Amino acid sequence: MTTAPPTGGEGRRLRRLRQLTEVPVAKLASTTDRQVADLEAIGIETVFDLLTTYPRRYLDRSRQVDLEGLFPGTEATILATVRAVRSRRTRQGKAMVELDVDDGTATVTVVFFNQPWRAKQLRAGTTALFFGKAQSYRGQVQLANPVVDVVAHDDPAAALDKMLRIVAVYPQSTKGNLTSYDLAQMVAEALDRAGQFLDPLDDVLRERLGLIDRTTAFREIHLPSSMELQAEARQRLAFDELLRLQLALGLRRQVIEREARGIVHHIEPGVFDGEVPHSLVGSLLASLPYQLTRAQRRAVEEIFDDLTAPLPMHRLLQGDVGSGKTVVALLGMLAVIDAGRQAALMAPTEVLAEQHAQSLAGLITGLSVADPSSLLGRRPLRIATLSSRLTAAQRTATLAGLAEGTIDLVVGTHALLTDEVRFAALGLAVIDEQHRFGVEQRAVLRDKGRDEGEGADPDLLVMTATPIPRTAAMVVFGDLDMTVLDELPEGRQQIHTHWASSELEVEAVWAAVRAEVAAGRQGYVVCPLVEASDKVEATSVTAEVERLAAGPLAGLRLGLLHGQMPPEQRDEAMERFRRGSLDVLVATTVIEVGVDVPNATIMVIEDAARFGIAQLHQLRGRVGRGLHQSSCYLLGEVPTPEGARRLDAMVASTDGFYLAEVDLELRGEGTILGARQQGRSDLRLASLLHDGELLTNARRVAEELTDAHPMLEGAPEVADELRLLLEVEEADFLFKS
């Protein structure tokens, strides 16, 4: 892949994106001082900001509905000018704004309820786009509460004369007084003055990918000559966004590999088949009351291959709820300990770290490691937790054990990243719920392995308990090799999910809980808040446990669990529930991950609309872990269509990867990309859900480019553009050498 030549016809230099970032919008003749201030208020300071503020939709005027052709029941976009404005109050006291609008073919009434500010926004003489469903009122056609995009406030006739057959409609903001027409004028001037753009994709590559050139793309996205060319423009500019993200990930991988100092762990052949005496891996496998699934075995083999390779492992372990990620990660840690190293597991919260430590401690009971100083030559495998609940003496002893190598496995939170934590020989770092940890934090944990011994990098295994779509994973985790556990262990029960919103339905849920308890099983009730709040109308766990004990679940043994309880009380409540001393555990989301009680068969989630899909799926995964049929009940009404879609999806499927796609569609890329979705590297056009083929092509091109030009040293134009558009910290990390 090569870049276009730096000059265009008759020696005219091609425009680089960096140049656009150096030209303030005040330089445009079409802007006034007031408009410059309004542009800055919505984050548009440079010509680059302006040209990457893309239209949010388009009105094809050849398909536009004239007012004379508007009939009740028709959903349409109309382009019309306000002729009269009236404000009044209804008999119920609601504010009402009435507009008479016309488009030269007819006049209709547009009505807004409880939007008094519309009278100022849509004064007489304003031309706007109105989108909504026409209805009949007293024999006349009208639009009620339509979506509005202001085209122009002043001289609308002149605006209409200049508007193209396809009208670009730009995002509006209450922070400024700019109209869509104002932005269109500025964009048109900027494009005319910018001229031809430098294109990082050469003619051959563009033809292979079926993409148009960048100059045409910028013009057609803003000033489309046809909807077909507008679609091609969007595809090209979306590809550029995805290519930048994939290039950044490719460079990150190259930086890591160039600086890597790997550990080649020795893992005995036949360890899977119990042929290695005293092997921790073999001992654990022999002690498990079940066989690993094929997916688990494949995952462990991939991890072992990485551990025995000269480059450090950078692998993502992704699996649905209950797919057995913890056992897979533990086998990797035991293999490293078998080879004479230490392992660390980092969790995002203290509660989750404690739950992991307790779960791992139960699995490794009875395992021992070689110890020449011991009389028998072996000692018990030692696990420790690094958390705030430790006394000063305990903390000192734990830190000393890590530094001396007498602690084999440590579980902790961000506390593991502090300077006082040192390891004798850290061989593997496992990070749970990676999307809450940044790249820099990963690097800090990695660097701790360089502090001692020969200064080698520990291997890195990232676990995510929240499945995300493949396309999103290629962006968020693109610098990691990926292992997916796509098989659930035998005996996992299908969970039946129901949504109960009416009073009668909710009564039936509590009856179902009592029936499960009567049959010898247990259940969970999850509430959004610890204590009642005046600001948020949601069930609080402390009030709810009292209400349930006095009402629907009277006579049952109820327990309380939330993150604000002292650790000792949390442990006691959880242990009583595990032993069966409690029938129902009323809790907050502290039970979201890591809680495994096979006898729990019913999950009730109150105010379910307040939770996201990923959290609902995780909570549901706390049941269905034993031999009995399990159920999950989602309680409460939902205030929004999006909330209803979330709950409908939960009822329809238990497939975490399908639910992740619904979540991505509803919430958008920003919530999944996290810190990556900021500033100039935003995905403004590309969709991780719908542009899978574009993303695959972008990844392939990024690999070709970084293979041909390591660290982009032979592609200065591409490197300059990437540095410009990435966040400063990431650009410095990638290009520091």
Image (tube, rainbow, N blue to C red):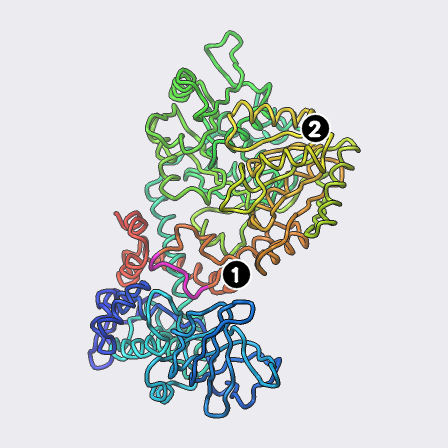
Quadrant of the drawing holding the N terminus: bottom left
Q: Residue at x 50, y 79 (%)?
A: 110
Q: Residue at x 58, y 31 (%)?
A: 561
> In what element is the residue under mark 2?
loop
Q: Dot 2 corresponds to which residue? A: 557
> Front-most of 452 and 140?
140
**Sequence-first disc among 1 and 2:** 2
> In what element is the residue under mark 1?
loop
Amino acid type at mark 2: Arg
Vertical relation: 366 (above or below) 229: above
Mark 2 Cα-neighbour bin, 10 Å: few <14, some 14–19, many ≥20: some
Residue 213: percent from left, percent from top: 36, 74
Q: Main secondary structure of the magenta part?
A: loop
Residue sitting farthest toward the front? 91
Mark 1 Cα-neighbour bin, 10 Å: few <14, some 14–19, many ≥20: some
Residue sitting farthest toward the bottom? 105
> Front-most of 545 and 575?
545
**Dividing the picture into quarters, in which one does residue 330 lie?**
top right
Q: Nearer the viewer, mark 1 or mark 2?
A: 2
Q: State yes or no: residue 300 in magenta.
A: no
Left or right of 389 in this view: 27: left
Amino acid type at mark 1: Leu
Q: Dot 1 corresponds to which residue? A: 689
Q: Residue at x 39, y 50 (%)?
A: 675
Would residue 334 be visible to someone looking at this image?
A: no
Residue 658: percent from left, percent from top: 61, 54
Q: Which residues are magenta?
A: 679-686
Residue 320: percent from left, percent from top: 60, 45
Disc 1 to disc 2, C-alpha distance? 46 Å
